[in-house]
Image: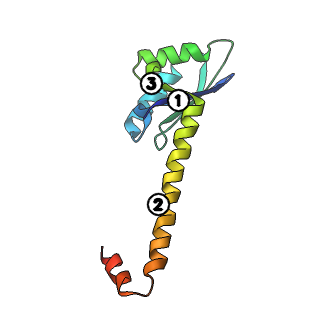
């Protein structure tokens, strides 16, 4: 998984493999990020690996927050994915899932009511 950043003034979303699928790590990430001066809200989603934080833009900026996250090993700017790359990857994965589903439906209809249907169920 690559790293992805989306920001608007006062709100930052960082997708990171450090947060994905690890509930214990999510709690540690929340504590670390809340300790950054100016950050007043943090939400870690372990399903998506996303950290969303709200901050006071007069106290801290997104660049400063990302530098702190990188120092703590939660972010790697060398693996940062652009918005276009991220969107392309998501669309590609979505297309693969839809393609598999359609292929499965076509096979199901093709073998419906035949001895091959029984065989395909067993496989």
In the picture, measured across the screen, residue 7 lies left or right of residue 32, that is right
**Does 8 sit above or below residue 100?**
above
Q: Rate crowding at label 3 as few (under 14), some (14 to 19) or many (20 or more) other CA atoms within 10 Å.
A: few
- In the rendered image, residue 23, in percent from the top left (x then y), is placed at 40, 40
User: What residue is shown with label 2?
Assistant: 100
User: What residue is shown with label 3?
Assistant: 79
| Mark 1 or mark 2, whichever is nearer to me | 2
**Does 77 sit above or below residue 25?**
above
Instruction: Evaluate whether residue 63 shows in this view.
Output: yes
Q: How many marks?
A: 3
User: What residue is shown with label 1?
Assistant: 4
Label 2 – label 3 distance at C-alpha: 29 Å
Residue at 49 percent of width and 63 percent of height: 101
Q: In which quarter of the image is residue 71?
A: top left
Please name whichever residue, 28 or 21, is drawn nearer the observer in this view of the structure.
Answer: 21
Judging from the image, what secondary structure is the residue with disc 3 in? helix
- In the rendered image, residue 78, in percent from the top left (x then y), is placed at 44, 19
- In the rendered image, residue 66, in percent from the top left (x then y), is placed at 52, 18
In the picture, measured across the screen, residue 59 lies left or right of residue 117, that is right
Marks 2 and 3, the one that precedes in the sequence: 3
Q: In which quarter of the image is residue 72?
A: top left
Marks 1/3 in contact by CB < 8 Å: the verdict is no
């Amino acid at each position: 998984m690559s790293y992805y950043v989306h920001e608007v003034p006062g709100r930052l979303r960082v997708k990171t493999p450090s947060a994905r699928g690890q509930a214990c790590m999510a709690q540690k990430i929340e504590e670390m990020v809340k300790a950054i001066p100016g950050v007043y809200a943090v939400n870690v989603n372990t399903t998506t690996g996303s950290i969303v934080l709200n901050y006071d833009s007069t106290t801290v900026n997104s660049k400063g927050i990302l530098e702190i996250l990188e120092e703590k090993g939660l972010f790697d700017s060398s693996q940062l994915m652009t918005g276009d790359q991220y969107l392309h990857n998501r669309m590609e994965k979505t297309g693969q899932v839809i393609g598999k589903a359609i292929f499965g439906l076509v096979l199901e209809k093709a073998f419906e009511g035949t001895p091959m249907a029984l065989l395909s169920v067993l496989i």
